[in-house]
Amino acid sequence: QNEYTPLLRNRPDSAQYGERIYNRGRWRAEDEASSSSPAPSQPQVNSWNETHESVVVSSDTFSATRSARHQNYESADDKDIVLEEDHDALRADFESLDYEVSDNLLYQKEEKDKSSKRWKLYWRGIRRWFICFLIGVITGITAGIIDLGVEKMSSVKFSSVKELVDRCVVDYCMYSPHLIWLLFNIGLVMVGAVLTAYIEPVAAGSGIPQIKCYLNGVVVPHVVRIKTLVTKVVGVICAVAGGLAVGKEGPMIHSGAVIAAGVSQGRSTSLNFDFNMFHDFRSDTEKRDFVSAGAAAGVSAAFGAPVGGVLFSLEEGASFWNQALVWRIFFSSMVSTMTLNIVQSYIKGHPWELSYAGLINFGTFDSVQYKFYELFIVIAMGAIGGLTGAAFNHINYKLTIFRMKYVQRRWLQVIEVMIVAAYTGCFAYVLIFFSNDCKPLRENRESMLVQFFCNDGEYSSSARLFFDTPEATVKNLFHSPPGTYQVLTLTIFATGYFFLACWTYGLSVPSGLFIPCLLIGAAWGRIVGVLLGMTGHGATFGLSFYSLVGASSQLGGIVRMTISLTVILMEATANVPLGLPVMISLIVAKWVGDQFNEGIYDLHIHLQGVPLLGWEPLPMSANLSAKSVMSHPVTVLRMHESVGRIARILKEESHNGFPVVDEYDPHTPKIVDGCETFGTFRGLVLRSQLLMMLKKKLFQENPDINEIIGSLKMAHFNDCYPRYTPIQRISLTSEERNYHMNLEPFINQSHYVVLESASYTSIFKKFRSLGLRHMVVINFRNEVIGIVTRKDLARYTTAVNDGIVTIEERT
Ligand code: ATP
């Protein structure tokens, strides 16, 4: 083992590479015995065995410690261990997006051509704006459809139950409305769960973690498919109308992103149609920009918060931003809010009365005031939000691991959703039954007030918490006059809803988390307000204010977003002065929560094994260099490569990028300074490009090859994007296998390289800020010695975070 041994060695035998789980630095049995007291002076060399990837620790840089929870890895059934102990392993089936434009001769020719015909550039700009407009319009309409669906289904459900309740209070048959209520709930959520489990599982949850990954540069399979959108929309309508502790806002963000991905490509590969438009936007770079716009439009439609939408895209992922992109994203957000506004005005029967900007309306907070000293109470509430948020995330994390282990079968997932729906219905009923929270009817004249067990002329205020859509209940909690709810009712509601929401998030059904968080927080915030009011300063402590602060603290403690949430809440309340307390509560909640665990979305990303790169490299990684994390040996191609070798490599290895080199002979290893080198670096070629070249049979032996290459356009390469023909489906005769391909016109000539001594920190920052997929490591002679991909960086971070590898000072 020489000093170039990478920290996390990669699988040399990539035939096994497709295996789902990347084992994060597991120790082999023989190493385990010695690793209990790792000796930094003795290099520990782990090699690959059939299923396990190993951590290789170079003696001068690292010592390894093995955490107790990894001790029994080799002893038990591998699958169980993966799910139970190694649940945060990185998975190999997540591929990266290519945000780097391949600067090859073909591309350069086309760009030169465009710069001489300026109208082409303008035309491209105009079409970009047009796509953003379409994204906004379609997202707004989709939000309208979701809202209408939820409203209609909920009103059918609630009015039937209300009618029965009113009758049964007199006839003593209260079991029957309960039964009907349960049947409605279970039936509706069953539809959503079946769709999700059997048609598109990636539509489960809010979709925010998946979109966050996409914006970060990782493709979560199926995440932006049309099937996912349909499942999401129908599923979320069923879940919300079915009374689960979920909201429809999170799924809107995912829906917006899918709409953007579809519209910007001008076709659907799932439905097999192509409008033959927008060819030049068929690349990861362009698509990602539009997906950012879609996500922003989704937030905007959900909360009526266009600026919040833009900030959400910024906070959650986009690596590089320019002014034009921000403008386009903002434009999409605005269009989406306006479209929803118009759609809603028609749905509500007041055409063109534009006062329905988002799916949720927090009502007006104009009269809400606070005093400076109340900001200290806000800080304390933020801390409560952080603590309860951390507890929520921890419980949900454990529950998700349990689900990953025991609730894998689809029918089990559907059953679980139905059980949760039934439980939610029972919880509501029991609360209404036992809490004697009756209020005189004359104080309130809303249609959905239910008498339940109250006397004539009264309504049950605890029933009111459940007999409406969650959005309406949040608004109620914010604005109901003092005395509407007893402290006991609110306490039971907040506690029960906390556990319900915790159980519900992660079920196999589309579900948003924003509304449940707001509900829990608004309930306990209101309790804080009521309790403070009892201290004798009654008039000063506004219940609306404390409900809002409680809601923002709870939301911040669970999701841990700051800037975008502040602006979203500010826009949703349409009150700038409230921005400060909201921001303080969010920041404190995040800060407190971060002391215990990550935000819920990050935890789920971690559990899925997505190689996500955080904002910053590990603080203690400054001592590391490129050679510590790179893969070595490297599979390279020569400038004039034989077709047979290319086809074999593509078949046997699943890498997506190959350095192209000169002066390389695969049969004669060249060692420089004790390290094998792989030829002089010339550029990088992508698997997708090689597949296209093979499919088009661009062989040098073809007499017309020069004319064929001369007539090639980038569009030819983008046509199959993003689903390229796999190598197994490209047929090559044995004669063709002896031919050659000239890779020169296709290699990316401005590909990023680093010297072997480059620091890990700078590599990480380049990956993060430029959205890189591969980085080639060279020596001072420009010879390739290694390659780094995002998985190398992510896996390394995970290994250190989990205590599998510790870094010591370089000697
Ligand atoms: P991605 O999957 O992110 O789209 P990729 O498939 O090219 O990109 P990874 O899946 O990240 O690359 O690579 C898995 C492992 O293989 C990594 O450790 C990486 O360093 C290594 N690797 C990638 N390309 C090569 C190559 N050409 N030669 C040798 N190892 C490579």
Image (cartoon, helix red, strand yellow):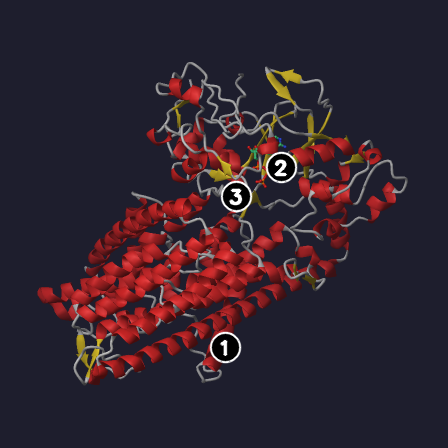
Please provide percent x and percent y for residue 686.
67, 40
User: In the rendered image, is residue 608 in sight?
Assistant: yes
Q: Quadrant of ligand 1?
A: top right
Taking depth in this image into account, of 61 and 647 the one nearest to the observer is: 647
Quarter of the rendering containing residue 248: bottom left
Q: CA distance from mark 1 to mark 2?
A: 47 Å
- Numbered mark located on residue 135 in the image: none
Quarter of the rendering containing residue 453: bottom left
Q: Is residue 80 left or right of residue 754?
A: left
Residue tagged 2: 654
Q: Which of the two marks, 1 or 2, is nearer to us in this view?
A: 2
Q: CA distance from mark 2 to mark 3?
A: 25 Å
Q: Residue furthest right?
A: 703
Q: Is mark 2 within 8 Å of ligand 1?
A: yes
Residues tagged 1 and 2 counted as in contact (Cβ below 8 A): no
Secondary structure at badge 2 equals loop
Please provide percent x and percent y for residue 258.
55, 59
- The disc, 1 or 2, on the residue closer to the chain's N-terminal end is 1
Residue tagged 1: 343
- The disc, 1 or 3, on the residue closer to the chain's N-terminal end is 1
Q: Is residue 89 above or below residue 472?
A: above
Please provide percent x and percent y for residue 271.
64, 62
Taking depth in this image into account, of 671 and 413 the one nearest to the observer is: 413
Residue tagged 3: 769
Residue at image coords 65%, 29%? 635
User: In the rendered image, is residue 553 in sight?
Assistant: no
Quarter of the rendering containing residue 505: bottom left
Q: Is residue 476 left or right of residue 790?
A: left
Q: CA distance from mark 1 to mark 3?
A: 39 Å
Residue at image coords 16%, 65%? 488
Taking depth in this image into account, of 611 and 129 the one nearest to the observer is: 611
Placement of the C terminus among the 4 image quadrants: top left
